[in-house]
Structure formats: C-alpha cells, structure tokens
Image: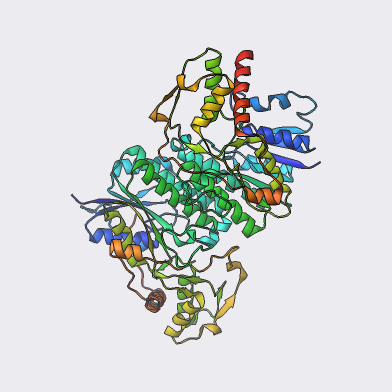
C-alpha cells in the first residue's frame, strides 16, 4: 500500500486529496497543528469513520515551524509521497502578517525539502505553488516558462518556495515538483476567500438572514477552477515519469461580478438589489490578468478541468444554503 | 544636524567601506553587530572609536536580523534617515549546506527589517543589497534591471525573495526602498572563503614558502568582478535620488577564475599551474552561467561607473595580502582598543 504524507490536510485541498488518495488505496498521514478548537470539519466524515481513521488515515501533531517534530513524523511515516499544501494561504492577510507568512510558506517548504533530502529513500515531493508567483506578468496566459514577478508578501514567499523546490530537484536530484495552481474553489474553500463570502451571502439573503453584501472591486478577474479537479492534478504530477513543474488552470477568466451573478442566479435572486461596493476590501497591490495555460499538464498528464464555473459556484451556494437549513 | 545611517552587516566588506564613506560625508553611522565570543569587527579597526570618547560618529549596537524585536527597538531609538541592509549569510556554496539559516537571515531578515521600519513609522530610506546570483541560470546576456531572475542556489533564492519583498513594500506602502543588484565585488577585505581572497591569501603564503598548493573547484567559472570600495558609493547614490528604484551595479566585463589566477601569480613572478590543485568539494551542486552586468541605468541616472580595472583589482588584492602576511610574520600587532 503506498503511503502519502500531507501537510495542510485540514484545508480545502488537503481534504479532497485525502479522499482521492484513500480511494486509490493509499495509507494517508496528515500533519495537523494543535489548536484549542478542533479545526477539522473538512475531515470530519473520514475522522469519524472507524474503518478509516486509525487504520488508513492517521493524523500527527506537528508544525512547519517545528522542524524537530516534523522530521520525526517524516522518519516514522517514511512516506512514498509528500504533498506539501500547508501555508499561510490568504493573500490579503499576508500584508498583515508578512513575517509569519514568510516563515510558514517560504521557510516551511525549505525545511521539508531539507528533511526529504536527508531521507534514506527520499519521498516524491509535491509543492503547492500558486499563480500569485506571476504577480504582474508581462503577458497572458502564463505557463511554466513565464518569469515570476510577485507583488504580495504571499506571492514572494510562494515564489521562493517554488524556486527552492526546483533547486532541490536540480541540485540534489529529488523527485520534487511544483504545481502552479490558479485559483480553485469549492464548498470547502476558506471562509474569508471572496468566492466563499459571496456564495454564503447569497444563501443568507435567500434564507432571509441578511439583506445585502458589501464587496471591493467587482471587476477583478481570476482564473477560477474547481478544487477536486485540481487535487487530481497534484496526484498525477507525482505519478509522472520525471519530476516537472506544471501549471494547473482553466484558461478562462471570470470577474468577481460573474461570481456574484452565478451565486445569486443559483438562489433565484437579483444581485443588483443586494450588492454594495466598499474600497476597504481592495488590496494594496492588486495583480492583474492572471490566467493560466495548462497545456503542458494536459499533454503530459492527461489532466483537464472538468466542472464548469457556473456549476461549481452554484454547488458552493447550494452547499451554503443547505448548511443554513441544518445549522 | 548630521544625517543618521543604520547599517546591517557593518562588520563585512561592504559595510566597512560604506561606514567609512558615510563618516567622510559627515553622517552619524550606526551599525548592528552580532554578539560573538571572538571579535568580529576587524574590518572596522581604522574607524573604530572608543565608546568613552566624546562626539562619537560611529556607534555599534548588538542585534541580529533573526531578532525582530531588537531591530524594531534599534530603529525606533536611532531614528535613522537611511538604512542599508547588507547583512546576510552571503556565501553561495555554504547556502547549500545551511539553507534554512541562509533563508532566515537573508530572506526573512529583510522582511523583518521592512516591517520594523513600517511599524516604527520612521521616515527612513531603505537600501537592499541584492545580488547577481539572482540571475543564476541567466535569461539574457548581459543582465540588466529587467532581466528575469532564475536563482540556482538557496542564497540566490533568498536574495530574490528579499528583492521582491523590497519592491513590494515600495509599491504597497510608498517606502523609499531601492535594490542595488551588485555583481561580484572584491577587495582586500573580501571574506577569506571567497575564491578571489582565497587565491590572494594563498598566493602570499606560497610566495613566502609557507605552503605549496591551493585547492580550488571550477576554474572556468566566470564572473563580473568589480572593486567593492566603488560599489558602496553606488549604494549611497541610490538613496540620494528623489525616487526609489532598482539598479544593476557591475563592470560589464567577465573573467574566469583561471584568468584571476594568471594575473595574480604573474604579478609575483610565479606560474599558477605549478600550484593549483582540484578539489571537487568546492564545486557547487548547481553552477550559475555567464554572469555579466549592464550598468547603463546606474551610469545614466546615478552618474556612477566602475573605475578600477580587473588586472589592477587583482594586483591590489595580492599586494594587500602580501603586506598583511609580512606584518604578521614580522610580529606587527594591531592596536586593539575594544572592551
């Protein structure tokens, strides 16, 4: 049975990846941080399943800024594959807490690479890189050759981690790959991300719990995909013959306005009556025209995004609405 | 009132030259030094002032780029007009052995310093010592400010992070923050483990009959080597501009380690082929390619250009190491005033 270790297992991608790997017969180990609140809602189904938890799914307390513990977990688990998804992943927040963003996202990745380098038989390593490394790109769409030009503390840290992963592949012959992922959403998206905020607000308005939604720049555009499609790309990247970097993206652009329209449409609401603008939510340095070209992943891995934009925004909004009914 | 400057890395090659330059220009100079049980201020000997003298212009403070609180406290207390961030784990080969420490100081250290400036609200101009190692696997020749980075070492990667976070703080918070992308720059004060200094020091000992061989790695590695004393002037010029910006500082010429050896050994009448041996320990896991800088922007906007030629640089380094060894053998003791 192949063994995988996931950092960031309690996050959106980590939880979908866990399901995918369990479905493919893996033993899955996750690294979790100790907190006094149990932040594992995304794993709760698996955690409470006695046939799974403690038999094929294991959680270990450790932290990216605790190298001793991390190293011990890595040596004990001796995984075949490491999926490194943990990071301070909120771009806007990285302006508030730049040092810890650097510490976890940049330094944390480097620490893992150092530990894998020291393994007797080094695990294959997947690094969750991000389209934020392109920042303000010279051209569109962006592919694996596009130079990095990050414009946020988050993007700087991710660019560091991405290059460092490539350096360990080139210098120490590790099977280390970067998946440069463009935005990917789902009902499990973090609650302070814009898509999730919009979907929740539409559901709350529908349920009569609130009357309006306030947003920053409605014209901001992103290449938004569906998270379960993207974690499949992670797995495929580690099954490839040689370690390579891949861009994962839909190649299409949608605006915040499109998210609003799709979400309110799913709830049969007229968005014009419910949405207000507020400049406080606009980021200090907003990246522009981020749209990915995933032809390398398509060509070499046979990967393609499956669920269309309107469909997953509707799924997200309906999930919020269902949660309001049961909660 | 004289301007105040704060220098991290003041005990290093560039820091010591910069401190001298700023003192000449009438600055009050503050430096951050790390506590060590051995003296680490040798390069500051000529400008060192006893803490008990009046009207001191050079002040050294204990601190570390790993210590965010100390940085904020020092910046708040000193209130500098200019901050020069020269401190780093600056050795490329060592960065492969000690990647995490290199990152902590070279990358995270820069963001700690920028955060300290932002937090304390001090109106300081900021200089970030960026490096040609950021170009690594070079995307064009020669390299200029617009050339994309492609670092090939943990050191290069950490420097790219520091470069971008500096640019980011300039754009997001309006800091007067500039990057000087300096190509290799050498001097008699270059760290002893860097190849140029390693050669000139060994050569002095070979000439004196104290050793026979020097062990080196890749002799074909090519670099754009300038004279450090001239490069620190460019740092100062960048912070005198109305607008912050990024500048390449280089000679535009490239020479191999082999050429360095030839000029150095011929200068004292020896043939390097008789004394050089190969040691693979000095090879980098990944070598950078042809690094050669185009400093036309600095020339045009700062009026800066390199003066000392490669051959003269090699010779002045050889002469300095010959003199140092002679002094040492003659028992000349440097005065040590520190407590």
Q: Is residue B58 above or below residue B270?
A: above
Residue B70 shows in the view: no
Question: Is residue B130 or residue A24 the one in the foreground?
Answer: A24
**Which image quadrant: the C terminus of chain A?**
top right
* B7 left or right, relative to B53: right
* A207 left or right, relative to A2: left
What sort of colour scheme is used for the picture?
Answer: rainbow
Q: Is residue B15 above or below residue A45?
A: below
Question: Is residue B49 or residue B310 the one in the foreground?
Answer: B310
Most extreme residue toward the bottom, as rendered? B269
Tell me where residue A86 appears, x and y as whole percent: 60, 38
Q: Residue at x 41, y 41 (%)?
A: A285
* B176 left or right, relative to B199: left
Q: Residue at x 52, y 25 (%)?
A: A198
Question: Is residue B188 or residue A9 the one in the foreground?
Answer: A9
Residue B225 shows in the view: yes
**Which image quadrant: the N terminus of chain A?**
top right
Q: How many marks?
A: 0
Tell me where residue A171 appears, x and y as whole percent: 62, 59
Which quadrant of the structure image shows residue B232?
Answer: bottom left
Tell me where residue A139 appears, x and y as whole percent: 49, 51
Q: Is residue A59 above or below residue B46?
A: above
Q: Residue at x 45, y 73 (%)?
A: B254
Q: Residue at x 65, y 27 (%)?
A: A42
């Amino acid at each position: 049975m192949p063994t995988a270790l996931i950092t960031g297992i309690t996050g959106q991608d980590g939880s979908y990846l866990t399901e995918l790997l369990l479905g493919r017969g893996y033993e899955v180990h996750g690294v979790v941080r100790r907190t006094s609140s149990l932040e594992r809602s995304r794993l709760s189904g698996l955690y409470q399943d006695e046939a799974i938890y403690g038999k094929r799914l294991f959680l270990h307390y450790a932290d990216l800024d605790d190298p001793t513990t991390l190293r011990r977990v890595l040596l004990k688990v001796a995984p075949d594959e490491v999926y490194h998804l943990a990071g301070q992943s909120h771009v806007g927040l990285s302006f508030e807490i730049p040092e810890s963003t650097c510490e976890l996202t940049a330094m944390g990745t480097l620490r893992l690479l150092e530990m894998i380098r020291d393994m007797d038989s080094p695990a294959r390593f997947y690094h969750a890189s991000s389209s934020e490394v392109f920042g303000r790109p010279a051209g569109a769409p962006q592919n694996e050759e596009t130079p990095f030009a990050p414009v946020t503390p988050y993007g700087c840290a991710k660019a560091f981690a991405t290059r460092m992963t490539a350096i360990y592949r080139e210098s120490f012959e590790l099977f280390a790959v970067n998946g440069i992922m463009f935005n990917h959403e789902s009902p499990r998206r973090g609650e302070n991300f814009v898509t999730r905020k919009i979907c929740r607000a539409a559901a709350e308005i529908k349920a009569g719990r609130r009357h309006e939604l306030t947003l920053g720049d409605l014209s901001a555009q992103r290449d938004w995909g569906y998270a379960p499609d993207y974690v499949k790309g992670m797995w495929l990247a580690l099954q490839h013959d040689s370690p390579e970097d891949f861009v994962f993206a839909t190649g299409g652009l949608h605006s915040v306005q499109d998210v609003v329209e799709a979400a309110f449409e799913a709830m049969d609401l007229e968005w014009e009556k419910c949405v207000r603008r507020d400049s406080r939510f606009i980021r200090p340095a907003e990246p522009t025209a981020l749209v990915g070209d995933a032809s390398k992943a398509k060509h070499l891995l046979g990967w393609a995004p499956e669920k269309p934009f309107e469909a997953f925004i509707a799924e997200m909004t309906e999930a919020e609405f269902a949660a309001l009914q049961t909660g | 009132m004289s301007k105040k400057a704060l220098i991290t890395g003041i005990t290093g090659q560039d820091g010591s030259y910069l401190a001298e330059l700023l003192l000449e220009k009438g600055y009050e100079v503050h430096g951050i030094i790390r506590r060590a049980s051995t003296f680490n201020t040798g390069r500051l000997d000529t400008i060192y002032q006893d803490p008990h003298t009046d009207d001191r212009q050079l002040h050294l403070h204990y601190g570390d780029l790993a210590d965010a609180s100390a940085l904020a406290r020092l910046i708040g207390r000193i209130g500098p007009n200019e901050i020069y961030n020269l401190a780093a784990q600056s050795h490329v080969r060592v960065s492969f052995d000690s990647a995490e420490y290199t990152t902590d100081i070279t990358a995270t250290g820069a963001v700690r310093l920028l955060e300290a400036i932002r937090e304390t609200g001090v109106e300081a101009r900021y200089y970030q010592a960026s490096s040609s190692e950021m170009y690594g696997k070079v995307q064009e020749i020669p390299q200029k400010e617009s050339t994309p980075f492609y670092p090939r070492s943990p050191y290069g990667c950490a420097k790219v992070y520091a470069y971008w976070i500096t640019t980011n703080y300039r754009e997001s918070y309006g800091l007067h923050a500039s990057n000087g992308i300096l190509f290799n720059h050498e001097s008699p004060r270059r760290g002893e483990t860097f190849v140029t200094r390693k050669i000139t020091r060994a050569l002095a000992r070979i000439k004196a009959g104290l050793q026979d061989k020097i062990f080196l790695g890749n002799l074909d590695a090519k670099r754009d080597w300038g004279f450090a004393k001239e490069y620190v002037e460019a740092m100062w010029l960048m912070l005198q501009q109305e607008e912050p910006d990024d500048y390449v500082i280089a000679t535009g010429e490239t020479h191999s380690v082999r050429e360095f050896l030839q000029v150095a050994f011929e200068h004292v009448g020896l043939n390097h082929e008789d004394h050089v041996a190969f040691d693979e320990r000095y090879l980098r896991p990944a070598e950078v390619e042809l690094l050669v800088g185009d400093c036309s922007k600095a020339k045009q906007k700062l009026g800066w250009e390199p003066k000392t030629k490669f051959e003269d640089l090699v010779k002045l380094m050889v002469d300095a190491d010959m003199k140092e060894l002679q002094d040492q053998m003659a028992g000349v003791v440097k005065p040590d005033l520190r407590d």
